[in-house]
Each structure stands twice: as C-alpha cells, then as structure tokens.
Image (cartoon, helix red, strand yellow):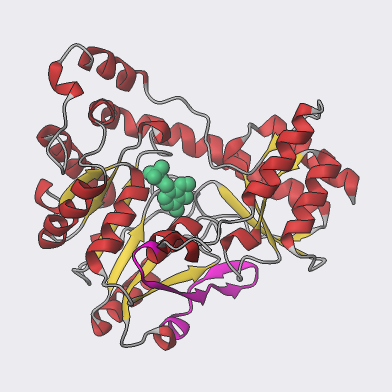
Amino acid sequence: MWPGRTRHITRPPIALVNRLARRLESEGRDIINLGQAILGLPPPSSALEAVRRGIAQPGTHAYSPDPGLDAVLARTATFLRTHKHITGASPRNLMLTCGASQAFANAVFTTTNPGDEVIVFGPYYFDHVFAIQLAACTPVEVPFAKEGSRFAIDLDLVERAVTAQTKGIVLVSPGNPTGFLADTGTLERLCQLCRRHELWLLSDETYDLLTFPPGTHVSPASLDVLERVCVVGSFSKTLGLAGWRIGYLHGPADMIEEAIKVQDALVVCAPVPAQLALLAALETIDTFSSRARSELLRRRDTMTRVLEASGLFDIHPPEGGTFLLARIRSAEPSLPFCTRLLEATGIVAVPGAAFGRHGEGHVRFSFGNQPVERILEAGERIAAVR
Ligand SMILES: Cc1ncc(COP(=O)(O)O)c(C=O)c1O
C-alpha cells in the first residue's frame, strides 16, 4: 500500500464510466456526454482581448502578490458587494485563487488542525472530501433530508453530528450534485448553529449566479449572523473561465492573512493572465450570466421532462447549478445502472455512488453540458431502453 497520506483517498468511479465511453466512441458510437460540468459557453471576448493586450506587458509574466493584483482584488470586492450583497467585502477580506478548488483547500488548511472533523452534506461534492482528507481531517457525512423528492437540510441532524472535534460545515448552494438551493431561513439557522458551536461555515458558491426562478442565491456572508464564513468562489461557470483557473476566497481578514501562507506554499498566486481576464470579464458578468441562466433553464426543463417521461427516475427539478440528481426507481446500484445505460444508449452519466453513500441509488445528469437538441436525443434513447 502507498505509504503517503493519499492512500486514504478513494477515487470516484467516474473513471470507469469514462473509460467505457472512450472505448465505445473509438468503435464509432455516438456518445452524449452528460457527465461533465462544462457549460460550453466561451468567455466574454473582452476577457480574451484584455489578455492579448496583457501579453505585451512584462508584469503579466511575473508573479503577482500572493492575494492578487490590487486592481483585480478591488474589482472583485465590488462584485461581492453589488452582486452578493456582502456589504463589508474589501481587498483585506479577499484573495484570488486558482479556482474554487484552491480556495476551498486554502480554507480547510487554514481553519482546521489534523484530526478535526468537518461536516459535509451527502450526497457531497467529492473534491471537498478529498481536500478534507488531505488536511488529515475526517469528513462527517450528514445526509440531506428529503421533502418529497426535493433535497433539504435537517438542522437537527446537523446538530446531532457536531462533536468536540467539529471545526466546520461545508455548504454547497446551489448544490453539486443535488441542485439544492438554500433559502434565507435555513441559512440563518445554519449560521446560528455554527455560532453556537464556534464552527466555520465553508460556503462553496461556485454556481451563485446560476439559479432558476423563483429561487435566488443568498450568501451566508451577506446575513449579519456569523463572522466565521469562508466564501469559496469561482468564475469557471459564471464567466466560462474554467481552464483559466480563477476564483476567490473571502472571509475575516485574519483568516485571509493565514490562508495566504497556504496559497504561497501551494501555488503562490492565481495565474496573472487569468486575473487580467477576470478584471475585464467582470464588466460583462450580468450579460454573460443572464445568457447562461436562460440557456441552462431551457436545458434543465428539457432534462427534467425527458427523465420524467422515461418513468425510470424520481426527480425534483434542480433549483440552481448544472446538475440533476435523479433517484433510480428500480433501486439498482448506480454503477451497473450507468454502465448499462452507456452500453445501451451511448449516454454518459455519473453514478451517484461517486458522491458518497447517500448518492448511491442516484444518477447525476449534467444538463449544462449539452444543447437542448442533444438532451432531447438523449431522452429518445433513454425511452427506447425501457
Ligand atoms: C461545487 C463545486 N465547487 C468547486 C468546483 C471547482 O471549481 P473551480 O473550477 O473554480 O475550481 C466545482 C466544479 O465543478 C464544483 O462543482
């Protein structure tokens, strides 16, 4: 067995499905990939233009200060105030990171000690659990409650999971893989619980601007209830900048000071060309995200309709994000189900088991990944296998 700490991490079974998909594709099968979380919308052209201009500047090819370039920090803080209603947001509370992934790792390493427990809601986003394990902490799974087929948070279950070792709670709203969106009342009560037990709330807001009516995203940092909130932010989906690796961590100034140590040890700073792209792209984030939202809404509605029509799943339409987590009615385990689905229809979907034991019995469909016509085509193929 590998002697290092990565031995404790089990990789999710997505690789198996992807390997099979590649084999089928090489045999000439038409594959519809509903596995990945890629929106496929190109970033704003102003971002690309800003990078083209930046290439001529020597500073673009050097490191920036660890937290980021002053102008980009200031502009991002403005975005947090205007779009997320985090009224106290300022460059002192903020650092730019290599995506939300880096921001989450910075937050976990900064707010925990080895042996601590961190609560995650299951089904969970697996990279969170990996980061918690890398920090030598224990992820403690609290299942999402179900209101019909809607995912919800049961605060009594959370309360019961808190021990003397608990340091934080991870919230993903809008949720991956669940499509769950936290309402203000739930957030207030969760913040009060964190305050009572002196816990950090690690709030992953990767899909913040991608919600569907009547829901809107509320950041717990915008409620005046809890100081210890780490906002983990991304521009991968809301500005189409996934490959550029740019996101942010926002929180109390003393936490950010400490998190800079983690960032310095791991990556030093977010890529400078990506920071320049972000600075320009933030000017058009309203146009970009409203286009993304309306396209995603069409895709979500189509995905919901075709899966409901198949009769194979119990479904609640996701309230935000790019995923629909459908419960398999036959209770077949998710890996054989997804393998069979792929072999029979050429559709790639992710087995729910990838998202922990509470994901078992489900399939995650990424409707953000394909245009409406391809989702309709996927629906016809699924209907034919019944
Ligand atoms: C919930 C969640 N957090 C973080 C990430 C990673 O975001 P980034 O590309 O900003 O690192 C993803 C990507 O799919 C995600 O779904």
Rendered location of residue 26, percent (x, y): 76, 27
Residue sitting nearer the eye, 108 or 148: 108
Q: Is residue 151 magenta?
A: yes
Residue sitting nearer the eye, 89 or 278: 278
Q: Measured along the vertical axis of the image, is residue 97 above or below residue 154?
A: above
Q: Quadrant of residue 60?
A: top left
Measuring 16% from the left and 31% from the top, which residue is drawn there? 63
Rendered location of residue 257, percent (x, y): 11, 56
Q: Measured along the vertical axis of the image, is residue 153 above or below residue 371?
A: below
Measuring 37% from the left and 84% from the top, which residue is drawn there? 162
Q: Is residue 291 magenta?
A: no
Q: Is residue 15 left or right of residue 129?
A: right
Q: Is residue 327 left or right of residue 75?
A: right
Measuring 27% from the left and 76% from the top, which residue is drawn there? 199
From this viewpoint, is residue 207 visible?
Answer: no
Q: Is residue 98 left or right of residue 317?
A: left
Q: Measured along the vertical axis of the image, is residue 281 above or below residue 309?
A: above
From this viewpoint, is residue 131 visible?
Answer: yes
Residue sitting nearer the eye, 18 or 311: 18
- Range drawn in magenta: 134-158
Q: Is residue 156 left or right of residue 311?
A: left
Rendered location of residue 153, percent (x, y): 48, 73
Rendered location of residue 87, percent (x, y): 16, 54
Residue sitting nearer the eye, 361 or 148: 361
Q: Quadrant of residue 104?
A: bottom left
